[in-house]
Image (cartoon, helix red, strand yellow):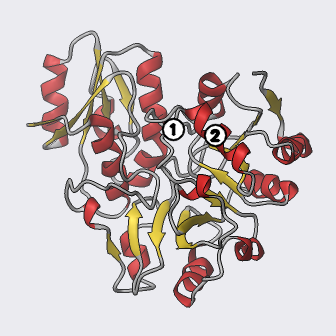
Amino acid sequence: METIFISPAEMETAAKLIQMGETVVFPTETVYGLGADAFNPDAVLKIFKAKNRPADNPLIAHISSLDMIDSLTSDFNPMAQKLAEVFMPGPITLILNKKPGVPDAVTAGLSTVGVRFPKNEIARKFISLANTPIAAPSANISGTVSATTYADVKRELSGRVGGMIEGEDCEFGIESTVVDVTKAAPVILRPGSITLEMLQSVFPDASLHPSLLSDAAVEKPASPGMKYLHYTPKAEVILVYGDRKKIAAYFEEHLQSEECILLFREEFQSFSKNKLSLGSASDLNDMARRIFKRLKQVDLLEFERVYIPAVEETGVGLAVMNRLKKSSGGKAMYL
């Protein structure tokens, strides 16, 4: 199919495509999304076709104001309202009990729906002009690395979607934190830039879903990112645990020509070959912004294998390691 490329000044075109039942790629502060009218099941199914996405993997409904939330749920409870007050608009998705009119295609047949109010101004204007919640997963072929730049999403989805809105590189670089607010206390289903520690500053009894604490299987995922292999480049990904300097020294000697390594700035300058920067080790938000972009670069540079240093699983490090463990499929080495 022919994809219409749309500048931020031409977003009425994107809104018309949505109203015609087409799909549109749009930038957000987390990753680029592939959207359709959340109340048009036929349009939503085009998302799954474009991505080759499993039908039991639910989507997230994006809104441009909290006024839109009433069309999706009648259970915008006090806990959800408080989290919205503190963290919205921003990189957080709330899992709420859905209204009957929300199509099963959006929710994978679940009784709940994920709702997100993005911070990105282009995303919000686009949704507002479309005048409907936009159902959207990340804009990439299912299972591959999420796109955080316009160049990457254009390369991957041109000819598979109705339209594509040009935007800048994504601010956070990893998908939103998904929080179930249908229980007695908030439960993180997918970690992101809104961390457990941030949630616990509002609700001290906020917790992580058991699947984030073990390798437990999730048969009916309430959130994207819980069940399937995700964030996987063509190159083999291997996580490396150990002291960063020891890791750099080892691979300076042992790295092969078909391999590359992602390094923090503190070790980057002294390393001589096949390297890409993760930013500073003292700022894991910087690593989060870069990680998907770097994995895309690994494939563009045609490396067969990439080594990535593991980080502590606290704060945003939990979200980064969640993505990297899925990227690696559990492959790791210890130095």
| Residue 51 visible in the displayed image | yes
Write down the residue under mark 2.
Answer: 47
The residue carrying pointer 1 sits among few (fewer than 14), some (14 to 19) or many (20 or more) residues within 10 Å by Cα, namely some
Q: Is residue 162 shown left or right of residue 144?
A: right
Q: From what the image shows, is residue 5 above or below residue 75? A: above
Residue at point 54%, 79% (across, down)? 83
Q: Is residue 234 shown left or right of residue 305?
A: right
Q: Quadrant of residue 308?
A: top left
Q: What residue type is labelled 2?
A: Ile
User: Which quadrant is the C terminus positioned in?
Assistant: top left
Q: Position of residue 135 (x, y in %)?
A: 66, 53
- As drawn, the residue found furthest toward the top would be 257
Say which of 63 and 277 sits in front: 63
Q: Which mark is residue 53?
A: 1
Mark before the other along the chain sequence, 1 or 2: 2
User: Tag 1's secondary structure?
Assistant: loop
Q: From what the image shows, is residue 6 above or below residue 82? A: above
Residue at point 66%, 64% (across, down)? 102
Q: Position of residue 282 (x, y in %)?
A: 34, 54
Q: From what the image shows, is residue 258 above or below residue 157? A: above
User: Which quadrant is the N terminus positioned in?
Assistant: top right
Task: Measure the C-alpha gap from mark 1 to mark 2.
Answer: 8 Å
